[in-house]
Image (tube, grey):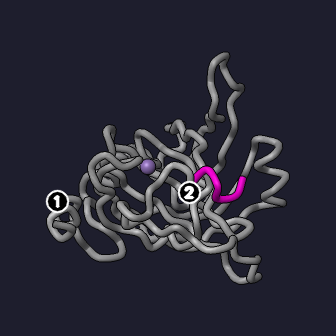
Amino acid sequence: MGLSEYRAKRDFDKTTEPAGGEAASAGGGPLRFVVHKHAASRLHYDLRLELDGVLKSWAVPKGPSLDPSQKRLAVEVEDHPLEYAGFEGVIPEGEYGAGTVMVWDEGEWEPLGDPHEGLRGGSLKLVLRGERLRGGFALVRMRRRPGETRDSWLLIKERDEHARAGSDAELLAADAVSVRTGRTMEEIARDAR
Ligand code: MN
């Protein structure tokens, strides 16, 4: 996908989001992942997985779950630059995605099998090693409905030792601070003023 759609949507004279350089070549090291909490016109979470020098990205309206019975809608969005993994701040009023962005989780991820085949074929199994999200997950692409311009996926926790039934309230409310800076959404917004 590349970063052209990402850049076309944003005015880097106005937003503090990174423009990103050339897509970095695969370093062979561990792959990063981040989950942003994003208070845009609608609050949502953004799952981003490093692959091929960019961050493959999905908007997850209800946020991720550690409960395997919860299938979370994850709408595929444009690739983001790798530098975006460290972005926390406020996208200004009037700009694309205006609102406060928090690093809600971050760490390393590992595809199980070939991730390119998984993304193409619509079934990607992966392991997340973050602070809040750990263990096996699956991303499963749904059939596109007429009129839909984006692919919708389901993000599902695998049954393993990190799965926790009924954990959502705890995940989404009690851990209401950035794993990177310890700030709440309000504090991030205040600090940007
Ligand atoms: Mn977003």
Front residue (pair 158, 4): 4
Task: Give the numbered dot on residue 16.
Answer: none
Image: magenta residue range: 1-7
Front residue (pair 49, 96): 96
Label 1 vs 2, first from the N-terminus = 2
Question: Is residue 103 among the parts visible in the rendering?
Answer: no
User: As drawn, which residue projects farthest toward the top?
Assistant: 146
Which element is circle 2 on? helix
**Three-letter code, disc 1:** Glu
Task: Give the numbered dot on residue 7.
Answer: 2
Disc 1 target residue: 186
Residue 168, given in percent of the width and then of the height, sits at: 36, 46
Quarter of the rendering containing residue 86: bottom left
Question: Is residue 77 among the parts visible in the rendering?
Answer: yes
Front residue (pair 92, 49): 92
Residue 190 left/right relative to 68: left
Give the spatial CA distance, label 1 vs label 2.
Answer: 27 Å
